[in-house]
Amino acid sequence: MTTLFIPRDSAARSVGADEVAVRLAALLPGSTIVRTGSRGAMWLEPLVEVDTPGGRRGYGQVTPDDAESVAAAISAGTGHALEVGLVDDLPWLADQHRLLFARSGLADPLDADAYVALGGLRALRAASAMDPLEVVAAVEASGLRGRGGAGFPAGIKWRTVAAAEADRKYVCINADEGDSGTFADRLLMEGDPFALIEGAAIAGLAVGATQGYAYIRSEYPDAVATMRDAVAEARDRGWLGPSVLGSGRGFDLAVRVGAGSYVCGEETAMLESLEGRRGMVRAKPPIPALAGLHGRPTLVHNVLTLASVVSILGDGADAYAALGRDRSRGTQVFQLAGNIARGGIVELPFGPTLRELVEGYGGGTRSGRPVRAVQLGGPLGAYLPASRLDVAMDYESVAEAGGMLGHGGIVVFDDTVDMAEQARFAMEFCAEESCGKCTPCRIGAVRGVEVVDRLRAGDDPDGDRAVLLDLCEVMRDGSLCAMGGLTPQPVLSALEHFGEDFIPRTAVGA
Amino acid sequence: MLMAFQEIQAEFGYVPDGAIAAVAEALNVSRADAYGVLTFYSDLRTQPPRPVSVRICMGEACQAVGARDLLAAVQGLDSARCEVAHVYCVGNCALGPSAVVDGRLIGRASAETVHRLAGGPS
């Protein structure tokens, strides 16, 4: 009997995985079809895998129309134009160093037995038998930094929350992954949800929190559904609940859904939203680690940060810290997006060059035209020109090159992009998504759109340029959070590296 | 408050007029606070939804592969029957441009595909 593996990930479904699965099931009666998470090779989706004695053989970009010929090839054991060989041997996957995404794509993401068989739960078993402060020490020793964008050392947060005295403490999973060009959180929640639950439970036991919340954006309905099912299953198995793995210590998790607000990805706005109010940013201090959700000490972490804890406790902090370079330890999940030939998830120890990612793994642009600009770190990240592709991808090196690693998103643009339009969009986006609490962000973004428009009209280029620079300085230094504070990054980087786009076409022609 | 409005919308498809007072009363907050929450979140709507919904992703990754042109090309669908709007990022950034037609996510979307799926009986 043949076993086929076809992703149920929403990206794979967006290009026809469901129809392919239905057709193959009809064409290959008697075969078993397992709907898995995605391997993260989005460029190959829908990727159909067939179990063979030598390993899983893959067929890439299978459309519903291809189902018949693929089914015939599978039955007869003959070759097919869409065949990509053994999936584990694909250089694109084999050359990666996967910790977070080691399991996604291998099994049904809601099959808890498969999760354990693939190495899951070792970390929670270990952590539940350890002294909580030992767990905190392991996270410190690993050098793990927050993967949500700011890169704050996780160990410091854990120690702060663990040391805080309170009647209740919380763990909040920030799954409000709103940055364009990033989809690793979604992929993990849809492909390996138990890893996130395990990481959250370890965090809860370590810092003394009894309740956790996963705040997932509403644009990710499949991730919400998968997480809800996984949480229910974990509760049934005693991985969550009043006595986690029989340790006598309790931790439970609830899923909450956002409502279409980008700024709710900012940690204090997320806490406001979790409490049911407008997602308005809070002034810090007090920091959430001391006074977070409902005023209690709260450990707030991005999805990938918490899921990384599973590797750290499962395989040792030393092994984790041995990966990466300088102050960027462990692996980073780079997400190749936009105009890219081979887009998807590339997980590697920190430090590959942007060129290796964009040209090597990514294969250049999808359009075949030259790369002109790359935006790193989401809508608030800087645009880098093609001449800066040799930057090493770790927190400090990217910052030195004038960029921001952020959540690891890499959005590629070809030479048809109008960078003045992108700069205008950055301001427009900020104007639409600003929470409105602080003036530089709320009003600055609106004025920013106007100034970029005037600059492009070209009536007073020097004057408008000076106003724009001044405005960006006020927003950067005067905003309460990263929304207004970082919006100048894409604007100023576009102006610096692509100044010619801001000159009116008529003036160029004159 | 947010969850209350989300549940009301899940039930009715939108948040009707009387809901603000009811939510304010039930949760012991002012009507102004309830109104503030309702108007903050772009998902919450105060008008009944039209039968067909088309949302085009306008995240930078989709802009890099023609989302602006796609949005312009499907704008004509906007009518009493069909609502065309933009959304910022649906997490399908390697397979853009992305569209969501009646909750169904479409990758590498073309204007033809969106037209076909949104066409339906009127």
Image: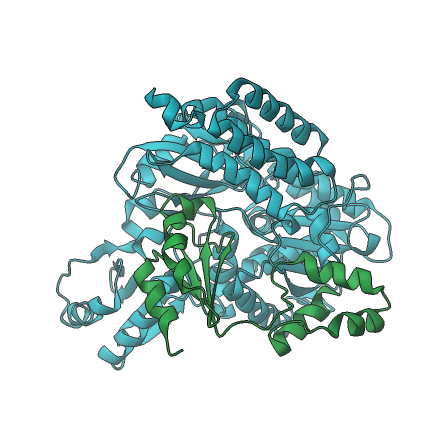
Chain colours: A cyan, B green
Q: Is residue A275 visible?
A: no
A276 with respect to B52 (left or right):
right
Q: Nearer the viewer, residue A113 or A287?
A: A287
**Looking at the rendering, in which quadrant would you find the C terminus of chain A?**
top left
Instruction: Residue A167: give x, y in percent of width and height.
Output: 87, 57
Q: Residue A133 placed where, x, y %?
A: 74, 46
Say which of A231 and A330 sits in front: A231
| Labels in figure, total | 0
Q: Residue B23: x, y in percent? A: 78, 71
Q: Identify whether A239 is placed above or below B56.
A: below
Left or right: residue A493 versus residue B99 is right
Q: Quadrant of the N terminus of chain A?
A: bottom left
Q: Is residue A102 above or below residue B35?
A: above
Residue A317: image quadrant is top right
For the point 72% across and 31% down, the residue is: A478
Q: Which residue appears at 27% of the width and 36% of the height?
A: A369
Question: Compared to A135, does A421 lie above or below?
Answer: above
Tell me residue A134's x, y (percent): 71, 45
Does residue A327 appear anywhere in the picture?
yes
Picture quadrant where residue A205 is located: bottom right
The answer to whether residue B49 is above or below residue B73 is: below
Q: Please indicate whether residue A468 sits to the left or right of residue B24 in the image.
A: left
* Near-viewer residue (A66 or B120): B120
Q: Horizontal placement of B73 versus B1: left or right?
A: left
